[in-house]
Image (cartoon, rainbow, N blue to C red):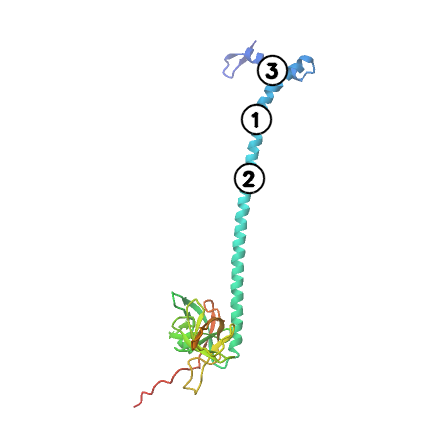
Amino acid sequence: MLFRSRLRTGARKEISLGGRSSTLLVVLTLIALVTSGSAPSKALRDALAEPLRLVTEPLAALGRGLATVGAVAADVQELRTRLAQTIAERDEAVASASRVASLEREITELQAVLGLRSTIRFSSVAVQVVARDFEIGRRLVVIDRGARDGIQVGDVVIGAGNTLAGRVIEVSDASAQVRLISDPEFSVTAEIASTGAIGLIKGRGANPLAFEDIDSLREVPIGAEVTTSGIELSQTLRSAFPRGLSIGRVVTLSDQAGTVIKNAEVESILELDAARTLLVILNYRGGLPQPSVAP
């Protein structure tokens, strides 16, 4: 069969439809046979069923596999997203909780220091710790007040609970350096008021304070409070520290038989390494009087 058409150019072109028509005719015939209910049609469907199954089932399985892989990838991505969000929420919560806990400690400390300032008999100034020097063996802090606030070298520094914290060793106009009682160069005479045991407290850095040279005849109960044993003979002749400042509690005791002295360890009541707010006593001058320069 020939189909003749005229193109826009006016030329005529012949297109053969013989091959295509034959293929189309075969396809239509197969469709008619497969969809027909006759016996030959059923036989043809049965004959084609197995080859078609062999072709379509792998394709279906491949489709299901691709769908499964896609679903797994989506789940993994969702889990990763949720994990990242959860980690961020956790870090934010931890940071917030840590900040809240820090503020709570600071509030408690400020309240205690304010209460202390209203009860002590000395004139004092509240200070903030702005720097710490905790090199091996040292326990020094820098405070934010100095000479213009009346602070002098030798001033006693106390903390919450009327607890001895240290002593001023250097002063500038707007700041001062304090040696804490935990510093190895710090020492103070102390006592257990309930038993009369007297000894020397010495700093040992991060370790408990040493309580040395205690009369072996005096009782040193575990848990007993240790305080400064200041002696005041006059306004110009008295101990370097006021009497009765709390230092800590006895945690261990070394009492060897046959010795005339015994030693103990004392845990400071004040958290010296973490204290932020302290009081500097301004009007207590202890120690021996300065020798006269007059002939």
Nearer-N-terminus badge (3/2)? 3
Residue 285: x, y in percent? 42, 82
Q: Earlier in the sequence, mark 3 or mark 1?
A: 3
Res 87 seen here? yes
Residue 157 in percent (x, y) is at 44, 75
Residue named by callout 3: 27
Write the residue at 55% across / 38% down. 72
Label 3 vs label 2, nearer the camera:
2
Image side of residue 95 versus residue 206, left or right:
right
Q: Residues within 10 Å of mark 3 (few under 14, many from 20)?
A: few
Q: Kindly state the secondary structure of the residue where label 3 is placed.
A: helix
Marks 3, 1: nearer the viewer: 1
On screen, 146 above or below 292?
above
Kind of element beneath mark 2: helix
Q: Residue furthest top?
A: 1
Residue sitting nearer the eye, 71 or 160: 160
> Which dot marks residue 74?
2
Task: Say which residue appears at 38% left-offset and 75% top-offset.
Answer: 169
Q: Amino acid at mark 2?
A: Ala
Q: Quadrant of the C terminus?
A: bottom left
